[in-house]
Image (cartoon, helix red, strand yellow):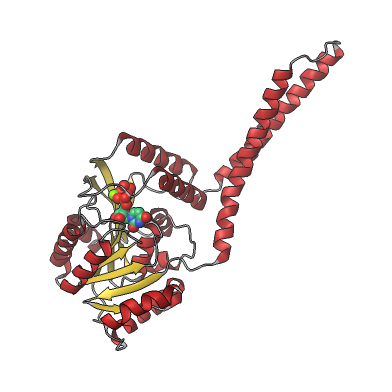
Amino acid sequence: MTQAPFLSIVAPCHNEEEGLREFCRRASGAAQSIAGDAFELILVDDGSSDGTWEIISELAEKVSQVLGVRLLRNHGHQLASTAGLSASRGERVLLIDADLQDPPELLLMMMPIMERGADVVYGQRTRREGETWFKLATASLFYRALSRLASVTIPRDTGDFRLMRRRVVDILLAMPERDRFIRGMVSWIGGRQVALPYERDARFAGTTKYPLRKMINFALDAITSFSTTPLRIATWLGMISAGVAMALLVYTFVRWLQDETVTGWSSIMAAVSAFSAIQLICIGIIGEYLGRLVQESKRRPMFMIETILRGGEHAELPTAFSEMSAGDKRAALDAAFVAGEPPAQQKSSLQKNSRIG
Ligand code: UDP
Ligand code: MG
C-alpha cells in the first residue's frame, strides 16, 4: 500500500486495552463515510504495560487501514501524538484521543468546515462528562493562566482533538522543540483555524492517564514554551523585595538616630526568610527555563519507534526517523513496506533485541 490515503486518523494509546476495539470500530466507521477505504487509522502504542499492543496487532491484521506504531517506551501523550503524526500520510489528519472522550463521529462535521477553507478545525469543549471537579477546576485555572501569559492566543477549553490540513501537519512536524504542547504549536502556526463546539463524553473505559504529576509537567511545558512572562515576574519580585529591604534599612537607621536599638529578632528573621524565599522562587523560575534549554540542546531523538505494523507485516523505520524532514519521512514509510523486508515472524523477536541493545 504505497498510495497515500486521503484521511489519516492518529490516536495515541497508553494502556487503553478495554476501549480500543470500540474506538477502532467507531473511528473506522466515521472515516469510511468520509473517505471510503482511502483512510488510515494510526494507533500509537505509547509504552503500554497492558494488552494494548496485542489488540493493535490484532486490529492491524484484520483491518488493512490500521497502522500500528509501537514506541520503545512511554514517551507521553504529546510525543506519542507526534510519532503518530510523523507516520501519517493523509491529505487531512485527525488527531484524537483513543479513550472515546472525543466522539470520532464529529469528523463528519469537521470535514465540511475544512471544505469551506479552514486549515484547522479544533474541537472546543462546552461540557465535560465524567471528570472530577478537581480535574475541571485545575484545567480551567490552567487555561485561564495560560491565556494571560502566552504570547499567542491559545483557545480555551480545547484539547488536541482537531482536524488539520497536510501543510499544517508538515509545519508542526518541522518545529524542532522536544517539549511539545501541540495545541499551542498549532495555534502558533496560524492560518484559518475554526472552533467546533462539542460536548466531551466520559471515557469509554479505564481511567485517566494524567495523574497530577503529569498534569503539572504538562502545564509547565505549556507555559515555558509559550511565554517568558514568568522570567519577568522574577525580575519584578526581585525589584519589589529590594524596595522593601531598602525601606526596612531606612526604618532601622531612623530608629538608630532616635537612639532606640533594634530589638526585634523575629522581625529580622521574618524579613530574611521572606527575601530568601523570593530569591529561591526566582532561581526556580530561571531553572525551569534553563532545564528546558539543556534538554533541547542535547538534540536527542524526539521519540523512538520500535516497530510499525500494517496488515500483519512488521517493518522497521530508520533510527533517525523522528528527525527526518516531512518528505523523507514519507519516503521512509513507503520504503518500509515495499522493500521486500523479511517476513514478520522472523523479524519481530529478532529485532526487538537488536534495536534496544
Ligand atoms: N496517553 C498516551 N501516553 C501517556 C498518557 C496518555 O498516549 O503517557 C493517551 C491516552 O491513551 C489517551 C490520550 O493520551 O488516548 C489522553 O489521555 P487521557 O485520556 O488519560 O487524558 P485526559 O483525557 O484524562 O486528559
Ligand atoms: Mg481522556
Question: Is 205 placed above or below 173 here?
Answer: above
What is the x, y in percent for residue 324? 44, 75
202 or 175, which is in the foreground? 202
Residue sitting at x 37%, y 69%: 86
> Residue 243 occupies which quadrant of the picture?
top right
What is the x, y in percent for residue 94? 27, 62
> Residue 40 occupies which quadrant of the picture?
bottom left
Question: Is 210 placed above or below 337 here?
Answer: above
Q: In which quarter of the image is the N terminus?
A: bottom left
Q: In this view, does 27 lie to the left or right of 173?
A: left
Q: Is residue 117 left or right of residue 21?
A: right
Residue lying furthest bottom in this view?
Answer: 340
Q: Is residue 340 left or right of residue 212?
A: left
236 or 224, which is in the foreground? 224
> Residue 294 occupies which quadrant of the picture?
bottom right
Question: Is 139 placed above or below 266 here?
Answer: below
Residue sitting at x 19%, y 68%: 59
